Structures are given as structure tokens and as C-alpha cells.
Image (spheres, rainbow, N blue to C red):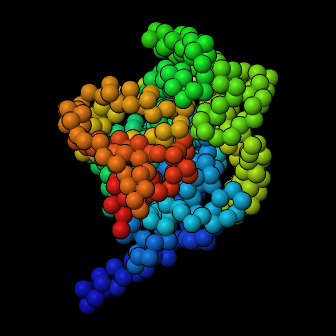
């Protein structure tokens, strides 16, 4: 009788796991909600259960997505702009990560997107504080969804997420070792990452010169501004370095006549960059430069959608006013913005068994591939020589060359062809290879 009762309990538990999701916005089963990561700080997550043809969704891995900024909304960019099941216009995507795995979008740090604080005193100010909040978020998530505790967890990120994700992964790993949380953390990936900001900034002028987008005079003006940024970084004058980063961006726009920072081949209006000089200085620090292209109404479409039907469907509190990018979040991280986290990546590689990966779109400027390769060359971990000696191979999907990869030890670099800063949206075939390589889904 006792054995029969235990068997029934197991069956009921499995059934509960299978039916835990609920209808949301778009196809498939979903779940969402707030986790109080600290008193006064409320972080929002949105979980999409995989629509793969499996008996139980826990047969597929769980992928976390962290956006950049800091202060950009994962719910907006990663979900609706890049690889979620529905785009900004309400169209179902043929290619979405949800078809292959469970996906957890997190609006992070608190204050970004649907996440909010009771007042700005509760905003984070450092990368370490961001990581601590994310660990608390995962504790709350697993409490609500214990069936995911043994499911392989893979952290993916983009842009400034490439600073947040390494420290989050490291803190989560240590919390697991201390038995504060149960999680099957497996890998962390840094997409077009702002991991070493100054290496990105110093790469802009030579990259644009080689592409023919600027001439030598433009190169020299950009390098002058970039070298001053590097001097401020060297002297740890972090707030001034962030301001000078913005000035260097302006030199790029003047010399290039308005190149798109996120994809150098994207169409832009040749005179639109001049309007940037009219923005208040604070806005220029975080304003997304894609506003220079022919989709200038995208932010309004996103705002109407995420403050309207999506907020209504998800039951977002009326006092939460969603925005694509929080200026308050960016501003409070001004003194942390230009700090590198190469040492954190070193620690991940040397002190943990986690697979660490970087993927980079070759058409990205803001976090260009040359700058990324330069900071990777500064990594100094015990299996460094193994990586350096490893062959670089092509990524071929259906006989099409989609990029390149190189693996040594527990580190992999992926070069993604025909893609800019938002590689998952620009080259889904190349990113599918990255996903399968790291997660082994299916």
C-alpha cells in the first residue's frame, strides 16, 4: 500500500509539472511573475515552456536571456525583436528558441522593463549587486518551479549582458556549491559582449577604416577620442570615461555620417545623426542609435504593445510604466559602465567546470568582433594554450558557411557571419548551431 501511495504521488507530481503553464501572450504555455530580490526591489521574469514535441518540457534545457543597456528590456529586445515566439507586429516566428528549449526572459537590473523598485534608492549601482539580485531571482524561480532544478541551465546574454552574465554565473555557481540553491548550471554565453569596454572602443576606428566607412582623417579624430577614453580608464576615472565614451560615439557618427552602431550595413538616414547633438547629454549616454534608421517608429510600436495588450494580459501593476531603456538604471551605473570583467571570465574558466562561450556578429560596431578578439587574447587561464593551439573551423549549415568556431578547454568562440549586434535575429541559422553546440538539445 505504501509503495502504491508513493507511485501515485510521483504520478501526480509529474502531471502537475506538465500542466503548470498557462496561456499568455502568444503561442504555447507560459508563466510569469515578480520575485522580490530585496525589500523594495521587484524583478520580473517571463518563462516560455518549449513547444518541442516532447513528453515533458523538462526533457529540454532552460535558457536564460539577459539584455544589455544596462537598463534595456529583455522582454522587448530578446523576446519581441530577436527570437521569441511572436514579433512586435504580432506575427508568429518560424524560428524561435522556444521551439527547441524552455526560455526565461528576465528584465534586469531592477528598474528595467517591467521590473521596478519602490524608489530609486533600491536600484543597483554595480555589477556585483546585479549578480546578487539575479541569484535571488533564481532562488525565487526555483521555489516556484522546482521541476527545473535538475534541468540543464544555460545563461545567454547580449551587449552589457556580457558584463552581467559572467559575474551572475560565477555567483550562482558559488551559491550552488554552498548548497544555498539547487541548479544544474551548465554554461554561460556572452553575445556581442561589452565585457571589456575599452577594447571595444579602441577597435572602432581601425574597423571602420578597413571597411571604407571612414577615411584617415575620420580615423584619426575617432582614435584621438578613443585614446582619451583609454587614458581615463587607465586612471580609473570611471564616470569621466563613460562621458568620453559618449563623445567618442559622436566622433564616429560625424566621421561616418551616421553609420548604425549595431549593424554597419544597415540602412540609415544620412542626415539623421545630426539630430543626436540636440538630445540632452543624459539621453545621449544611453539612446539606442538604431533610431537613425528607417524604423524610427519601432520604439513607439513596442511601447504601445508592452504598455497595452501585453501588460494587460500579464496583469502588470498599473504603476509600472514599461520602457525600452531605463535612463535611471543607466545613469546610476555610470561609474561601473566602463569597468572590464575579464578577471571574472578568468575565474569562471579556472575555478568552475562551466562551459564559457562568446559569440560575435561580424557586422557589429558597438561591440565589434576585433575588439572582442583583443580582450579574449588577454584571458589568462590554465588552459589558455590549449585554446590558442586549437583549430578554427567553419560553421556549415545546409552547406552554407554561417561562421566559424574555435574551442580549447572549456572556452569557445563563435564568429557569426552576416550578423550585427543582435546576432540571434540577424542569422538564425548560425545561432541555431551555437545553441545546439552549447545545449545539446534534442
Residue nearest the viewer, comparing 255 with 233? 255
Residue nearest the viewer, comparing 141 with 368? 368
Occupied quadrant, residue 412 = top left
x and y, in percent, of residue 155 in the image: 42, 49
- Quadrant of the drawing holding the C terminus: bottom left
Quick check: 111 left or right of 143?
Answer: right
What residue is shown at x 80% (from left), y 23% (from top)? Answer: 278
Task: Confirm whether residue 258 shows in the render.
Answer: yes
Residue nearest the viewer, comparing 49 with 91? 91
What residue is shown at x 46% (from left), y 72% (from top)? Answer: 52
Quick check: 144 left or right of 289?
Answer: left
- Quadrant of the drawing holding the N terminus: bottom left
Quick check: 364 left or right of 346?
Answer: right
Occupied quadrant, residue 169 = top left
What residue is shown at x 37% (from left), y 51% (from top)? Answer: 395
Q: From what the image shows, is residue 102 above or below residue 264?
A: below
Q: How many marks?
A: 0
x and y, in percent, of residue 220 in the image: 57, 12
Q: From what the image shows, is residue 196 above or below residue 69?
A: above
x and y, in percent, of residue 188 in the image: 37, 45
Q: From what the image shows, is residue 183 above or below residue 101?
A: above
Residue nearest the viewer, comparing 57 with 116? 57
Task: Confirm whether residue 134 shows in the render.
Answer: no
What residue is shown at x 21% (from left), y 35% (from top)? Answer: 389
x and y, in percent, of residue 13 in the image: 39, 76
Amino acid at each position: 500500500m505504501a509503495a502504491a501511495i508513493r507511485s501515485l504521488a510521483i504520478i501526480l507530481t509529474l502531471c502537475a509539472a506538465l500542466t503548470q503553464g498557462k496561456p499568455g501572450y502568444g503561442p504555447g504555455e507560459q508563466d510569469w511573475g515578480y520575485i522580490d530580490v530585496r525589500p523594495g526591489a521587484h524583478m520580473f521574469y517571463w518563462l516560455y515552456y518549449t513547444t518541442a514535441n516532447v513528453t515533458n518540457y523538462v526533457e529540454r534545457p532552460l535558457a536564460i536571456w539577459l539584455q544589455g543597456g544596462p537598463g534595456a528590456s529583455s522582454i522587448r529586445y530578446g523576446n519581441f525583436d530577436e527570437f521569441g515566439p511572436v514579433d512586435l507586429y504580432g506575427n508568429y516566428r518560424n524560428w524561435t528558441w522556444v521551439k527547441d528549449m524552455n526560455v526565461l526572459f528576465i528584465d534586469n537590473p531592477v528598474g528595467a522593463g517591467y521590473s521596478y523598485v519602490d524608489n530609486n534608492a533600491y536600484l543597483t549601482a554595480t555589477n556585483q549587486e546585479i549578480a546578487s539580485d539575479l541569484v535571488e531571482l533564481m532562488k525565487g524561480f526555483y521555489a516556484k518551479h522546482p521541476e527545473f532544478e535538475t534541468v540543464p541551465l544555460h545563461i545567454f546574454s547580449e551587449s552589457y549582458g556580457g558584463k552581467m552574465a559572467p559575474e551572475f554565473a560565477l555567483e550562482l555557481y558559488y551559491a550552488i556549491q554552498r548548497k544555498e540553491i539547487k541548479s544544474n548550471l551548465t554554461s554561460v554565453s556572452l553575445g556581442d559582449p561589452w565585457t571589456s569596454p575599452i577594447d571595444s572602443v579602441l577597435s572602432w576606428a581601425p574597423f571602420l577604416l578597413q571597411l571604407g566607412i571612414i577615411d584617415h582623417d575620420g580615423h584619426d579624430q575617432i582614435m584621438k577620442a578613443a585614446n582619451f577614453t583609454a587614458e581615463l580608464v587607465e586612471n580609473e576615472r570611471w564616470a569621466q570615461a563613460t562621458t568620453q565614451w559618449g563623445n567618442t560615439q559622436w566622433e564616429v557618427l560625424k566621421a561616418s555620417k551616421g553609420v548604425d552602431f549595431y549593424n554597419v550595413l544597415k540602412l540609415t538616414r544620412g542626415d539623421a545623426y545630426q539630430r543626436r547633438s540636440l538630445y540632452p547629454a543624459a539621453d545621449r549616454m544611453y539612446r539606442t542609435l538604431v533610431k537613425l534608421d528607417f524604423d524610427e517608429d519601432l520604439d513607439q510600436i513596442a511601447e504601445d504593445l508592452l504598455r497595452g495588450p501585453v501588460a494587460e494580459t500579464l496583469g502588470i501593476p498599473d504603476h509600472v510604466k514599461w520602457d525600452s531603456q531605463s535612463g535611471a538604471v543607466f545613469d546610476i551605473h555610470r561609474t561601473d559602465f566602463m569597468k572590464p570583467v575579464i578577471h571574472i571570465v578568468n575565474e569562471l574558466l579556472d575555478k568552475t567546470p562551466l562551459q564559457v562561450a562568446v559569440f560575435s556578429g561580424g557586422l557589429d560596431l558597438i561591440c565589434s568582433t576585433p575588439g572582442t578578439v583583443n580582450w579574449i587574447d588577454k584571458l589568462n587561464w590554465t588552459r589558455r594554450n590549449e585554446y590558442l593551439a586549437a583549430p578554427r573551423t567553419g560553421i556549415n549549415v545546409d552547406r552554407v558557411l554561417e561562421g566559424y568556431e574555435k574551442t580549447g578547454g572549456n572556452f569557445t568562440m563563435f564568429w557569426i557571419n552576416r550578423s550585427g549586434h543582435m546576432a540571434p535575429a540577424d542569422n538564425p541559422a548560425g545561432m541555431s548551431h551555437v545553441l545546439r553546440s552549447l545545449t545539446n538539445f534534442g
